[in-house]
Image (cartoon, helix red, strand yellow):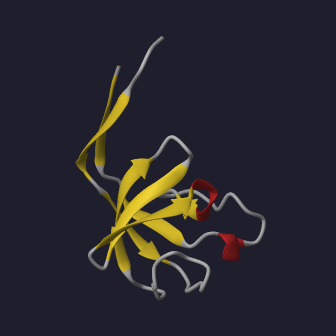
Amino acid sequence: MVAAVNVILEPDKAVITHADPGLDAPLQAGDQILGYGFGGSGDWNYWAKGEWHKLYYESVLAKDSKCGFRDPKGCYARITENGIQEWWV
């Protein structure tokens, strides 16, 4: 069995694109957040307003990419600057 760990040397910088009461954090459009990669369940872990939160991976818009949903309202965070990550196996 092979195991790996994602080491975050510098987090992604992202911005909330629009508010959604369904998010687990009270965020508004324009709020800055820090992304710390994807967990085993596929959720994107991020830091906002002094707390850890998770966002469904399809809801995160990668830098210079497009949303995983047909309706862009399904994407709530846009990565503006990629961080530095290493995969250790």
The quarter holding residue 2 reads top left
Farthest residue, direction right: 70
Asked if residue 13 lies left or right of residue 2, the reply is left
| Number of residue marks | 0
The quarter holding residue 23 reads bottom right
Q: Residue at image x 48%, y 87%?
A: 29
**Image location of residue 28, percent across then percent down:** 47, 88
Farthest residue, direction left: 9
**Image location of residue 68, percent across then percent down:** 68, 57
**Image location of residue 15, percent across then percent down:** 42, 74
Farthest residue, direction top: 1
14 in relation to 29, above or below: above
Q: Residue at image x 35%, y 19%?
A: 89
86 in relation to 55, above or below: above
Q: Nearer the viewer, residue 72 or 55?
A: 55
Asked if residue 61 lies left or right of residue 81, the reply is right
**Image location of residue 86, percent across then percent down:** 30, 34
Q: Residue at image x 57%, y 55%?
A: 57
2 in relation to 17, above or below: above
